[in-house]
Image: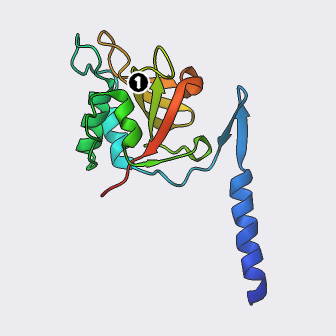
């Protein structure tokens, strides 16, 4: 029979082992063990769009696409969700170090202090999915492309 006083130490050891399970790929540290997906429905809905067009030929639709994906997943997009920067009021704020799949990333375009922006959905493993332009289908992209332009990261919450 195990010593009950040692059980917390065993649990601490297991937790530390999982936290230490990382690998570095191209200078990016990645966790090898990811048991938790924040919003699997949102991720599945976003991935279902991959390779398909969203309002082909119409500009300024990244925010509307994210609005459609979040709505279809049971979340309420922010007021004025067709403007990328309005997504900074969506859900709850998250630090970059706490980024999880399903988080919404808001970036700036043109100028950090301007009004133009872009919205992406984080998939995990340094990968996002977004509607980049009116002439390209929904596609995946490395977070590294937008890392220096992030204005905020928002985690979807149900009200």
Give the quadrant of residue 58.
top left
Q: Is residue 119 left or right of residue 29?
A: left
| Quadrant where the C terminus is found in the figure | bottom left
Asked if 66 appears above or below 139 in the picture, the reply is below
Residue 150 versus residue 128: which sits nearer the camera? 150
Q: Which residue is pictured at 32% across the width and 56% down the height? A: 158
Count of marks overlaid on the render: 1
| Quadrant where the N terminus is found in the figure | bottom right
Picture coordinates of residue 20, whole percent (x, y): 74, 52
Residue of label 1: 118
Q: Which residue is pictured at 41% across the width and 23% down the height? A: 117
Asked if 41 appears above or below 126 in the picture, the reply is below
Picture coordinates of residue 154, whole percent (x, y): 45, 43
Residue 49 in view: no
User: Label 1: few (<14), some or many (≥20) within 10 Å?
Assistant: many
Circle 1 SS class:
strand
Picture coordinates of residue 40, whole percent (x, y): 38, 48
Q: Is residue 135 left or right of residue 7?
A: left
Residue 74 in view: yes
Picture coordinates of residue 14, whole percent (x, y): 71, 65
Residue 79 versus residue 145: which sits nearer the camera? 79
Asked if 8 appears above or below 77 in the picture, the reply is below
Residue 38 versus residue 153: which sits nearer the camera? 153
Give the quadrant of residue 118.
top left
């Amino acid at each position: 029979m195990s010593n009950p006083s040692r059980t917390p130490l065993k649990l601490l050891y297991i937790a530390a082992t999982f936290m230490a399970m990382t690998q570095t790929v191209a200078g990016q540290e990645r966790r090898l063990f990811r048991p938790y997906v924040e919003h699997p429905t949102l991720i599945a809905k976003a991935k279902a769009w991959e390779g398909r067009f969203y309002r082909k030929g119409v500009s300024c639709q990244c925010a509307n696409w994210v609005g459609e994906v979040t709505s279809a997943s049971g979340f309420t997009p922010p007021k004025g969700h067709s403007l990328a920067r309005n997504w900074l009021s969506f859900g709850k704020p998250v630090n970059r170090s706490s980024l999880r799949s399903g988080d919404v990333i808001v970036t700036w375009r043109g100028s950090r202090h301007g009004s133009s922006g872009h919205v992406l959905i984080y998939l995990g493993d340094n990968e996002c999915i977004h509607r980049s332009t009116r002439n390209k289908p929904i596609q995946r992209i490395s977070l590294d492309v937008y890392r220096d332009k992030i204005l905020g990261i928002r985690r979807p919450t149900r009200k």
